[in-house]
Image (cartoon, rainbow, N blue to C red):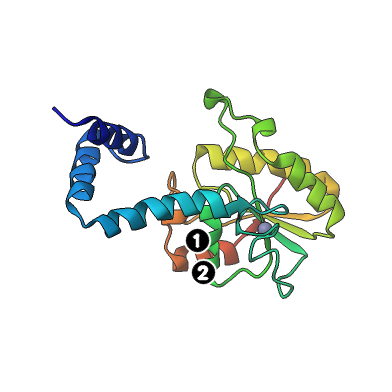
Amino acid sequence: MYTAPLRTLIDELGRLPGIGPKSAQRIAFHILKVPNEDARRLSDAIAAVKERTTLCDQCFNVAEGGALCSVCADSRRDDAVLCVVEDPRDIVAVERTGQFHGRYHVLGGALNPLEGIGPDQLRMRELLVRVEEEGITEVILCTNPNLEGEATAMYLARLLKPMGLTVTRIASGLPVGGDLEYADELTLGRALEGRREVEA
Ligand SMILES: [Zn+2]
């Protein structure tokens, strides 16, 4: 029914998150229809993001063409406060609130035993090393307000509290079960402001 290249494109698009077979087909036919230069811009953008984007050596945020991301490279940020998030997208969400001026640590996900994600699959060891070496006085656990995010926050709190620093969790009030990246700035800003010390 399709030519081979069209079939390949539909298959590849269908592997993207949130794109079902119908959408994949619609996007593929759209690409077929647009001018060559528009299609080229899309394929160039995909190639460039893979070639030029790396992970920050320090916090594992996305970085462009250097060892450090823009937050870690910024000397005006507060070294004493570290915000722990699951994903680089969450950094974008927290930055949008304008409420946080410290630094970040990206875990690379949340604990999820059913999917085989344990502490060793996340950047927890790297976090503990940073807490020991960087003079951090507060860690804000800013994982998602869902089952995995809460479990991850509690697990980290048990590791971090004995190290003698303040460990806080963003306040409830965020839509439960949701992802941070979908929270609006105001709600997330309030959740950050209203963070509470974790009892352990
Ligand atoms: Zn960084």
Query: Is 180 left, or right, of 13 in this rendering?
Result: right
Q: Is residue 200 visible?
A: no
* Residue at x 71% of width, y 44% of height: 157
Tell me the residue that label 1 is attached to: 93
Q: Residue 97, which numbered label?
A: 2
* Residue at x 63% of width, y 66% of height: 70
| Residue nearer the viewer, 181 or 190 | 181
Query: Is 1 left, or right, of 52 in this rendering?
Result: left
The picture quadrant where one finds residue 133 is: bottom right
The answer to whether residue 68 is above or below residue 119 is: below
The answer to whether residue 121 is above or below residue 196 is: above
The type of residue carrying mark 1 is Ala
- Label 1 SS: helix
Query: Is 188 left, or right, of 61 in this rendering?
Result: left
The answer to whether residue 197 is above or below residue 8 is: below
Quadrant assignment for the N terminus: top left
* Residue 54 x %, y %: 61, 51
Residue that protrudes farthest toward the left in the picture: 1
The answer to whether residue 52 is above or below residue 146 is: below
The type of residue carrying mark 2 is Thr
| Residue nearer the viewer, 48 or 71 | 48
- Label 2 SS: helix
Q: Quadrant of ligand 1?
A: bottom right
The picture quadrant where one finds residue 121 is: top right
